[in-house]
Image (spheres, helix red, strand yellow):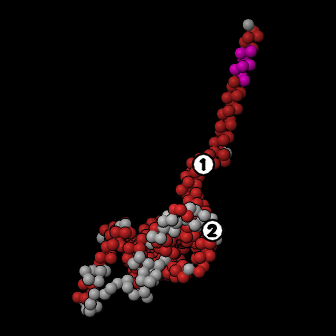
Amino acid sequence: MGEQATTQNLSTTSQTRDRSTSSNAIVSLIEGRAWAYLLLIPSLILVAAVVVYPVINGIWLSFHEYRLNRPALGRPWIGLGHYRDMVDDPVVRRALKNTLIWVTVGSISQFILGMITALALHRGLRGFRIASVLVLIPWLLPSVVSANMWRLMLDSRLGVVNEVLGRLGLISDGHAWFTDPSTALYEVLAVELWKNFAFFTLFFLAGLYAIPSEYYEASSVDGSGTLQRFRDITIPMLMPVIVGAIILRVIGLFNSPDILLVLTGGGPGHATETLALYGFQTAYLRFDFGYAAALSVLAMFCLMAFTVVYVRASGVTKE
């Protein structure tokens, strides 16, 4: 009997020790880095499926000849053939120039108007709550809806814009908008400004509300004026928001040809052709997905280069 009791006690002690060891292993797993990596696995799988795989597949496709209207051709390997064609393609050179104008003028104009609007709305005067909602309406509208609305308003025969300008004596007859190659891109940029300046307004307004009012009060006590407070307090405190908003807006302008597609289709004579629009038309009008993939790769590297240079130049990562 004594030997059985001793054996049972030893067995119980061994089981308790095993459970304790298992519990300690679980605790160490939870407290260590391994648990963090385990929690990241679902997100990493999702990112790989949604981002990494399409990017790699697009780069791989750019080295092949792939035309949907020529299925018998298959998908032969052509190496750098599409990239050599891009060097000799005059439309690509024109599209790169237009893209630079489109992104630069679009982002700067929307930044300035968005900042002015955010500063005005931040004052909290009577009626500004309604104004803040009205400002967001163009941004909330789908781009295709906004573009078609402006296309009707700017119609040379039935458009309300020509009617109003004619009654004011600013034009004598119906003006055909988007037909002059020297001004068409800037006319579309005006529509883009109306549509998307609220993007900056929303970001900057949130950033302004996050700045403690004590900073402005202390600066006022020291005798600082409005412009000095804006320069010394508002801009430095908003810098992380400014950098993030500009990067996102540049990416949006670079990759969104929808307003250009509806209003001009890249014309007249490629005067409003951007790289994203050219890639879209190459893929879905010419069905040349191989060349379109090469254009997309070029656009991706342009955006990556801009992001790296801009973030380093802004100095926001040094803080």
User: Foreground: 22 or 151?
Assistant: 151
Does any portion of residue 301 appear in the rendered image? yes
Alpha carbon separation for disc pair 2 and 1: 36 Å
Q: Is residue 250 magenta?
A: no
User: Foreground: 224 or 168?
Assistant: 168
For badge 2, the amino acid type reads Ile
Give the left or right position of residue 218, taking residue 17 as reference. left
Where the C terminus falls, by quadrant? bottom right
Q: Is residue 8 magenta?
A: yes
Q: Residue at x 75, y 9 (%)?
A: 2
Extreme residue in the right direction: 3
Q: Which dot, 2 or 1, sits closer to the camera?
A: 2
Quadrant in which residue 209 is drawn: bottom left
Extreme residue in the left direction: 167
For badge 1, the amino acid type reads Ile
Q: Residue at x 25, y 80 (%)?
A: 158
Local packing at callout 2 (Cα closer than 10 Å; few below 14, some 14-19, many 20+) is few
Q: Main secondary structure of the magenta part?
A: helix
Quadrant in which residue 269 is drawn: bottom left
Task: Tell me the element at label 1.
Answer: helix
Give the left or right position of residue 135, taking residue 272 as reference. left
Disc 2 + disc 1, Cβ < 8 Å:
no
Say which residue label 2 marks. Answer: 78
Say which residue label 1 marks. Answer: 41
Where the N terminus falls, by quadrant? top right
* Part of the protein shown in magenta: 7-14
